[in-house]
Amino acid sequence: MRITGYRTMTTVQEWGRPIGDANGVYADGTVSVPIVLVDTDEGITGVGLGPHVQADSVFAALDGEDPRGVTALYDRMLRRTFKAGHAGAVFGTIGAFDTALWDIKAQAAGEPLWRLLGGRDRTVPAYASGLDIGLSDSDLASLYQTFAGYGLRAAKLKGGLDIERDRDRLTLVRDVLTDAAHGSRPSLMLDVNESWNRKQAVRHVREIERHLDLTWIEEPVRRWDAEGLAVVSRAVHASVATGENLTGLEQFRPLVAAGAVDVVQIAAVWGVTHFLRVAAFAHAHDLPVSPIGNTPVALLHAATSAPNHLVSELQDLRPPVGVSVDVSIGDGAFVLSDTPGLGVRVDEAAIAPTFPRPHDEVGDGPSVRPDGAGRQLLARTDRGVPTGAGRG
């Protein structure tokens, strides 16, 4: 079997609600989703969800190769981008190709990827994550009631701009999930997307912990601030979760060495091989891992073989336009199928009429770190969060 070519396209995710975080909000709830398709001479096509920046350069490492040598090909792609630097969108392109190769390998073997990777159980524990900072209280409650209907009993909210608002919203969601579980205590997480400095982080989390049991605080300070993350971890009861924006083992090493991370997060966009390597590294240090992403199906398959997998993020109940994913949700977990490969299919005709949204192209909303992030003293409500969003 040989790789003969690749194709790229872009579809959209239609959330049906404003989505965002402390850095900004997409008010129309529609964002672009790039896709990479890798073709072979045996008619098997693999699917990778992720960027295609410098795709020609990355693909040069794969052209004519046997896709089943995916791990070695991953390193070949890294070497190919040595001077450009395997980080950011380029690392995402490598991840998209890597995911497509794993899809091909599992399809060729006639097995779902979770089975090929050595997984025993097709169920993957999930938590609800609504990207919900722009929602009113009534919409927030309605969203998590929907998640609760699928058996989810853990939730991660976006926040970081207002201590009182974060406390009130977490309390609201706690009550929704508690009612759905007939009194069972849910797990609550708060993601502030690197919007604080160290003192802000400690002050904010400690205030919340006076009222609530917080499972983890996510990205309280900058992703590379090993000392700062360690300071926060030592000063609060909640675990510190971080890592989704780190690319390569070399970026995780200083955080683990400093005791700066309690839950190692790995973004789906970086690919399966990256996840497997980071998960093994974290396991060697007795740390749990948690996949992050909108459609993290590839990492769900990989998570079944990771002994230190904790829980995976569920952001939306619908896949992107023109994409079908053979995964169901029930009893608070993703349930993978027996479909060979990833179980992802792309309807190219359905995708053809869609276009990237203008805000994706200019990079506004959550993609841009606001001026003054980490320096405010009081609550801020002017970062794309609708005025009065905290009222139902």
Image: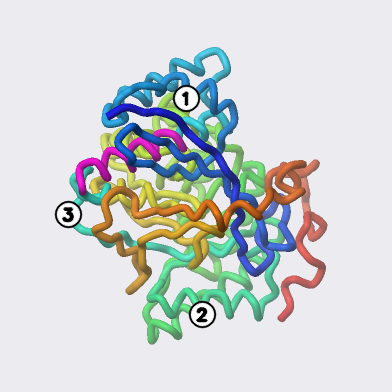
Looking at the rendered structure, which numbered label has been put on residue 145? 2
| Residue with the mark numbered 1 | 59
Which residues are the magenta region? 96-110
Residue depicted at 51% across the width and 18% down the height = 81
- For the C terminus, give its image quadrant: bottom right
Sequence-wise, the earlier of marks 2 and 3 is 3
Magenta span includes 270? no
Residue closer to the observer: 237 or 360: 360
Q: Nearer the viewer, mark 1 or mark 2?
A: 1
| Residue with the mark numbered 3 | 120
Sequence-wise, the earlier of marks 1 and 2 is 1
- For the N terminus, give its image quadrant: top left
What is the distance, in whole Å, between disc 2 and disc 3 at their CAs? 31 Å
Sequence-wise, the earlier of marks 3 and 1 is 1
Q: Position of residue 152 (x, y in %)?
A: 41, 72
Circle 3 packing at 10 Å, graded few (<14), some (14-19), many (20+), is few
